[in-house]
Each structure stands twice: as structure tokens, then as C-alpha cells.
Amino acid sequence: MKKFALALTLVALMATPTFGTLLLNEPFSYPDGNLVGNGGWTNHSGSGFFLQVSSGEVPVLHGSSSREDAHTVFGSAQGTIYSAFDARVENANDAVYFAHLMIGASTTFRSRVWVVPDPAGTGDFTFAISDTSSAQVPWGSGLDFGTTYRVVHSYDLTTGATSLWVDQANEGGTSVAAVISSSVEAVNAFSLRQSSGNSQEYVDNACVATSYNEAYNCIPEPGTALLLGLGVVGLIRRR
């Protein structure tokens, strides 16, 4: 019994929780209406055609009239930040970026996710990634209108490197990297952007984390120390 009590003490000491790894979990489960004002979402640009929640997702609709851009702050982090969301595209006649990371309530944008016409002509469109507002690098294959894809994009807070994955269950899957063309910034917010053009993207289940798996699955990973500690308890109980 004393050994078991000692093991529990060791677990308590070893299993220091890893706070802040899942930085944002946004299912957009709000009543239909304006996104801004819910869950920390704030307008930082534009007015007129507002970002709206509709049946648990957010249509990002581009057009000629004034459009809204909004963000939600997820806080500071270190290392690499991974941002993931479900995206369904219904129209994409031009190149436009619709999601990115940023410094909250500023015009400092990084890791921009684009919808662009498929350069290979094998699909209806494709996604692309860029560091700033130009030099977007397209995903390697064409994609289909009306299909939901899990998009992950990353930003390295040390080097400024940014990458894109589409429907890749782990970080070791296929990715494309943007050209680094600007200074490194301590981004702390996720943004949706509406602009000119005819593209229509529908976004849901957005998550930001400090690991790929957490962002992709929107689930915090258990701490390694906790798993190790539970293993120690199991060994002692068997004795």
C-alpha cells in the first residue's frame, strides 16, 4: 500500500499538465447571425457584408461590395503553430486568400490560405499557401467544388516558415511550403477574410494548436509524463 501511495505521489509530480497546446477550438456552434460578438470574434476590417454563422458554419463570401474581416485571439505560443479547419468551396474563379494568422487587431498577416484556379486543370480549384499577399504556392493536385477538405497550415514562430496540408492525417503526409518573404511575427490570432471576387468558401471546425495532431483532430493530446506515470502505477500494482 505504501508503494502504491508513493507511486501516486510520483505521478502527481511527473504529470505536469501541458497547458495551452490546444489554443483554439471553434466549432461555430452559435445561433445563425453575425459571427462577430460570439466566442471572442472581433472585426478588424471592412463593414457592410458581414461574416455570418449559418447552420453551424461560416460562409466566406467574396464580392464587389464592402466585406468584413474578423479574427479571434488564441494567445501566445512558442515553436510552430498549426491552424486547421474544414473548408468547402462552391466557386473559385479567381485567386483570393480567405483565412490566415495575424497579430490581433492589426494588419500584420502571415500564413495565408488561398483558393486559386487549379493550374493543372485537373479539378475545379485548389488551395494555396503564401507568407504574405503574393507568391502563393498551390497544392499539388486539383480539388472539387462541394467537397469538404481538412486544411492545415502552419507558422514557425522562429523562422517564419509556413506550410499547407490538405486531407493529411499526420504531419508527415504531403505538404507544400511557402516562400519566406517577410519578417517573423509573433502571431496570436486566427482570421477569416472576405474580399473582392466570386469565390465562396464555407468554414467549420477551426482549431489552432502547438502540434499537428491536436489541430487536425481538435483534441488535446495527453502529456507524455502522465502516460509514463500511469505505467509506473500499473507495474507496482502488478507486484
Image (spheres, rainbow, N blue to C red):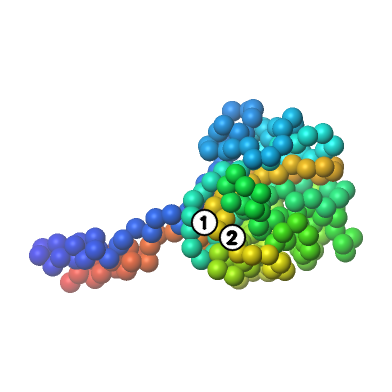
Would you place residue 32 above or below residue 118 in this image? above
Secondary structure found at label 1: strand
Question: x and y percent of residue 154 in the render?
Answer: 61, 61
Residue 35 appears in the figure: yes
Secondary structure found at label 2: loop
Q: Residue at x 85, y 58 (%)?
A: 118
Residue 169 appears in the figure: no
Q: Residue at x 83, y 52 (%)?
A: 95
Looking at the rendered structure, the kind of residue marked 2 is Glu
**Residue 169: which quarter of the image?**
bottom right
* Residue 235 placement, left or right of 139: left
Tag count = 2
Q: Residue at x 59, y 70 (%)?
A: 159
Would you place residue 226 above or below residue 207 in this image? below
* Residue 173 placement, left or right of 133: left
Q: Nearer the viewer, mark 2 or mark 1?
A: 2
The disc placed on residue 209 is 1
Q: Residue at x 49, y 51 (%)?
A: 75
* Residue 139 placement, left or right of 121: left
**Residue 28: which quarter of the image?**
top right
Q: Which quadrant of the figure contains the C terminus?
A: bottom left
* Residue 211 placement, left or right of 90: left
Looking at the rendered structure, the kind of residue marked 1 is Ala
Residue contact at pointers 2 and 1, CB within 8 angstroms? no
Would you place residue 63 above or below residue 103 in this image? above
Q: Earlier in the sequence, mark 2 or mark 1?
A: 2
Question: x and y percent of residue 164 in the render?
Answer: 68, 62
Q: Residues within 10 Å of mark 2 (few under 14, many from 20)?
A: some
Question: x and y percent of residue 162 in the render?
Answer: 65, 65
Q: Which residue is mark 2?
A: 185
